[in-house]
Amino acid sequence: IISDDQGYADVGFHGSKEVRTPNIDRIANNGVVFSEGYVSYAVCSPSRAGLITGRYQNRFGYSRNILLTPKDSTMGLPLSEQTLPDVLKEANYKTKAIGKWHLGAHESLVPQKRGFDEFYGFLAGAHSFFPAKNAQPFHSTVMRDTSPVIEPEYLTDAVARETVAFIDANHTKPFFAYVPFNAVHTPIEATKKYQDRFPNESNQTKRDYYAMTSALDDAVGSIVAAIDKHGLTDNTLVIFVNDNGGPTYTGVQSNGPLKLGKLFLFEGGIRVPMVFKLPSTFEPNTEYDEPTSTLDLFPTICGTAGIELPAEIKLDGVDLTPFIKGTISGSPHDTLFWSNGPNSAVRHGDWKLIKSYDSTWLFNLASDIGESKNLAKSEPEIE
Ligand code: CA
């Protein structure tokens, strides 16, 4: 389950005072919370490319957000790359993508060509949460597989409904549901049902953002309830993560103590809520404090499923399970990297170095999570 542009602090388990997220918190309380979970890029599309391939997306030239160009076969995830659902499908998992794709709209790049048996959602980077009106360029069409549909429900509710139906239809066999919600990305739109939960919020944009987050939380609750209903709780890995930090330009997300947000390589852009739940394997109420990455999801999912990766797949992510369980000591990553045009960042131990054009920042995150004290001049040897 992936949220979109959610603030780091806009979940209960990171201390949100504004919006309650009891269902997302329940995943956290019954599983592993990653206190230093990162994405591999600070905006939507390249971050998803890293997640779904387990490889730094820069390795295959995917270093910016893509445009919606259905006639361009080069605009999206290159066909040279194998995806997580490719591997799961090969291992006889039933696979479905439900929500926002944003990895290519050309007919050769759609979910069904990238390892998914089924698709419900839209191909672009954003979508209205209300039934789409025709001829609005902001909207791509909601589709069931390759057929356009008019979705009558609030889109977050619809993504939950479709995911629950997929679980209901496939609970007797191995299944993989990839659920990239477009909540809580713009447009900031909510229905009265969710708005009414925030009667005291006078700022309408904030109220609607909180309402969207609350709808997302309800949707997560429905999906987890479907897993529980079929008796699959113990051996189903549930992951909740966000695709990039909350943007600062909307004025409604909170990244808590983290600096800036989406688009930036400061912590607010790349450190995200990340939780796993798999009761047969991970102790409830576990916190894992070493730096981890969404690049790790591919090998960790395959590892927990007992799937050996094909030798030709060279991943940058690592299987986190032995690190979480303590059977391997040390950190899964000595170093993590980010690169975006003129901007680059590296995390090594507690140190983080950021370069942008002629500017350099060096922070010690152990004592300065908010990246307020630039040590580049005082610690030249570290730089
Ligand atoms: Ca995003």
Image: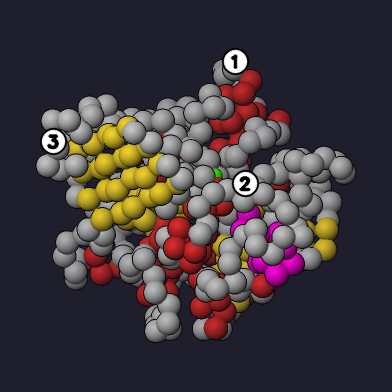
Q: Nearer the viewer, mark 2 or mark 1?
A: 2
Q: Residue at x 16, y 65 (%)?
A: 329
Q: Nearer the viewer, residue 197 or 375?
A: 375
The amino acid type found where label 2 is placed reads Asn
Ligand 1 in which quarter:
top right
Instruction: Tell me if the residue at label 1 has its CB under 8 Å from ligand 1.
Output: no
| Residue 98 can be seen in this image | no
Coordinates of residue 105 in the picture (x, y in percent): 71, 59
Residue at the spot of label 1: 202
| Residue 44 can be seen in this image | yes
The amino acid type found where label 3 is placed reads Glu
| Mark 3: secondary structure | loop
| Stretch of the chain drawn in magenta | 101-111
Q: Decide which of tag 2 and tag 1 comes sooner along the chain.
A: 2
Residue at the spot of label 2: 182
Instruction: Tell me if the residue at label 2 has its CB under 8 Å from ligand 1.
Output: no
- Marks 2,1: beta carbons within 8 A: no
Residue at the spot of label 3: 379
- Whole-angstrom CA distance, mark 2 to mark 1, is 25 Å
Q: Residue at x 36, y 31 (%)?
A: 259
Coordinates of residue 292 in the picture (x, y in percent): 32, 55
